[in-house]
Amino acid sequence: MIASKSVISDGKGNISVETVQVGPPGAGEVLVKIVAAGLCHTDWDSIQNWNKAFIVGHEGAGIVEAVGEGVTGINKGDKVILNWAIPCGECFQCREGNLHICEVNSPVCGCGLDGHAHIESSKRADKPIERSFHLGTLSEYTVVKKEAVVVINSDIPYSSASIVGCGVMTGWGSAVNAAKVDAGSSACIIGCGGVGLNCIQGAKHSGAAIIIAIDINDERLEQAKQFGATHGIIAEKDDVDFANVAEKVREICGGRSADYAFECTAIPALGSAPLALVRSAGTAVQVSGIEQRIDFNCELFEWDKIYINPLYGMCNPERDFTKLLRLYDTGALKLDELVTKTYSLEDIATGLDDLINGRVAKGVVMMPGYDKASN
Ligand SMILES: NC(=O)c1ccc[n+]([C@@H]2O[C@H](COP(=O)([O-])OP(=O)(O)OC[C@H]3O[C@@H](n4cnc5c(N)ncnc54)[C@H](O)[C@@H]3O)[C@@H](O)[C@H]2O)c1
Ligand SMILES: [Zn+2]
Ligand SMILES: [Zn+2]
């Protein structure tokens, strides 16, 4: 086994940097040397709420160190992005083409540890320890199922590649795969953090002509404009049901509400906000995955509106990561610009503090020996 410095949480709000033992990969598994790991708001939630010990992190990129029996098409030395929606390829949803909600392997569809590499592949003080989203990327090494890696062929720095596997995919895919934004349309993005900025990029790629960024933070709106927003609206926390924002959206869109609106904050009170911003027969998208009970006026649905809550931008990992990397390589997708700050593993507390206080678009942890430019 290999010694691997890792961020461990007790799921009760505490974290520590400890050395765990990792490897070797079992049949159908891959040992990856992580180079960079992105921080997502969901990491913060997991540290506060999961109430069990685990290795933190679900965004990452690295180098294949070894492959287990029966693994083909993935070789030692390959550059890979990790993916937490791990398709089995055979269940009902995988066969329907919904690889992101695999009924066997998905860590968020109530499927237990089936998508996890064999549990003894990571040990803390001789006892097996679970990995967040079956990946646990805040760790120098990880063992994952082969379906959890996508081999890439690009000079992209690992820091920029590391964020593709959650924040970028979720935002971009919600616009492109889920809402299928039309060319020439209007779209509102509520919350312009790591996910929302990529929703803006997705709407832009789809040809939306009016892209309205909405946030409580001025800096976020400025940044949103660099990623493709054509307008910005500052939201006020006491604007119940987004009535004031809705008025401004109608003005910008020439008297009628927007064609699409995307909620990217995970604030339960904003669950109805995208409905308030779209016209009749428009599409409201809850990108963030709110899970609390919320009450709202059904008049907001009038009339013929569609409200969807896609998971992970309806990710098909091989197809979408390949497209995203191509767009990056041709300069059409901004990823380097999203990585506002990098941290060492020991700096993890600062990284999380910057994340929850909105000081960064995306923060990325670089493993020992690597920096932001490493590719
Ligand atoms: N369901 C999924 O597939 C999935 C995947 C990734 C992330 N998420 C969730 O999406 C959410 C966003 O993630 P992130 O990494 O972008 O977080 P983030 O903290 O980077 O961004 C949140 C943004 O919302 C803004 N905001 C806060 N209150 C607001 C308000 N009242 N009105 C308008 N804007 C407001 C903040 O200023 C910030 O810019 C998280 O809660 C995360 O857990 C869900
Ligand atoms: Zn995430
Ligand atoms: Zn499946």
Image (tube, grey):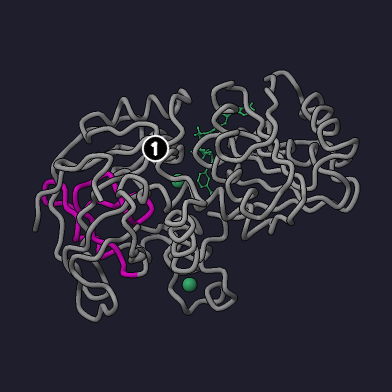
Q: Amino acid at mark 1?
A: Val
Q: Quadrant of residue 341?
A: top left
Q: Is residue 171 visible?
A: yes
Q: As displayed, is residue 69 above or below residue 340?
A: below
Q: Is residue 54 visible?
A: no
Q: As displayed, is residue 1 above or below residue 56?
A: below
Q: Residue at x 31, y 43 (%)?
A: 56
- Image location of residue 143, percent across then percent down: 23, 60
Q: As displayed, is residue 305 above or below residue 350?
A: below
Q: Does mark 1's beta carbon lie closer than 8 Å to ligand 1? A: no
Q: As displayed, is residue 123 above or below residue 246?
A: below
Residue on which the image places disc 1: 339
Q: Residue at x 67, y 43 (%)?
A: 262
Tell me if 36 is positioned left or right of 188 in this view.
left
Segment tinted magenta in the rendering? 117-146
Q: Nearer the viewer, residue 255 or 43?
A: 255
Q: Nearer the viewer, residue 185 or 12?
A: 185
Tell me if 229 is positioned left or right of 166 in this view.
right
Residue, far front: 330
Magenta span includes 128:
yes
Magenta span includes 144:
yes
Q: Residue at x 68, y 22 (%)?
A: 234
- Image location of residue 202, percent across then percent down: 60, 51
- Image location of residue 15, percent across then percent down: 27, 32
Q: Residue at x 53, y 63 (%)?
A: 101
- SS at badge 1: strand
Image quarter where the N terminus lies is bottom left
- Image location of residue 132, percent across then percent down: 35, 49
